[in-house]
Image: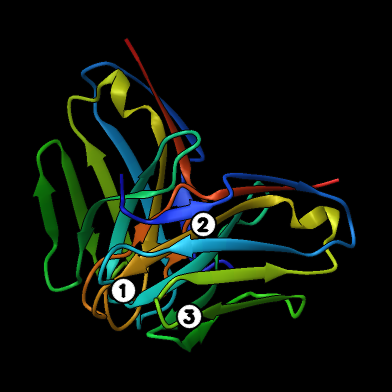
Amino acid sequence: QQQVKQSPQSLIVQKGGISIINCAYENTAFDYFPWYQQFPGKGPALLIAIRPDVSEKKEGRFTISFNKSAKQFSLHIMDSQPGDSATYFCAASTGNAGNMLTFGGGTRLMVKP
Amino acid sequence: DSGVTQTPKHLITATGQRVTLRCSPRSGDLSVYWYQQSLDQGLQFLIQYYNGEERAKGNILERFSAQQFPDLHSELNLSSLELGDSALYFCASSGDPNTEAFFGQGTRLTVV
């Protein structure tokens, strides 16, 4: 049972464009929503995270938008760069940030120069 | 570098065999998590230990077991291996429950 659905599975964006990845969840008990970035041969690395008490969080070129009523959240990468080419995973957990994470299926992003 | 160390990086073994994957968490982190990443199942939580005790269990097979030792390192034991167990196995660690989990670089297991 997939509790976090992520789309699209793959995404190609031109350099300088905006990359948008969407996730939807089912479990209303989720209260921590991180995004991870994974390069080939590496482990996932925390990119940015949000809790449902805010609707948006921005860190540099990365922004999370959160819609609690729709049970959806998304990652926006502004001014996308070739170095952003990686696989991105949304995730969710209950309770605390360190609790077990339920991951989305991943989005493979390619930013063309 | 996340500070989480996993060994070995690669492991090739035959069906029916048993292997042990090792994880050293970041200094001071009490929680260790094990995840499996496969092409068809994605990233799935297996099990969590906190300060030596099992805290949460996910989709972990009965053939798999884990433990966390007094020095906080953890081992994941996989036995009676099947072809379908071929995957990347990640360990992550976190400090107290309100801190984020940091992932190691993983162990790639290939069962032939």
Secondary element at image label 3:
loop
> Where is mark 2, residue-wise?
B90
* Same subunit: marks 3 and 1: no
Q: Position of residue A87 (x, y in %)?
A: 44, 38
Q: Amino acid at mark 2?
A: Phe
Q: Would you call the spot at circle 2 few (<14 residues within 10 Å), some (14-19), or many (20 or more)?
A: many
Give amino acid for label 3: Phe
Q: Which residue is mark 1?
A: A98
Q: Amino acid at mark 1?
A: Gly
Q: Chain of mark 1?
A: A
A103 on left or right of B101: right
Q: Which residue is mark 3?
A: B69
| Marks 2 and 3, the one that precedes in the sequence | 3
Q: Nearer the viewer, mark 2 or mark 3?
A: 3
The chain to which mark 2 is attached is B
Where's residue B72, x and y in %?
40, 76
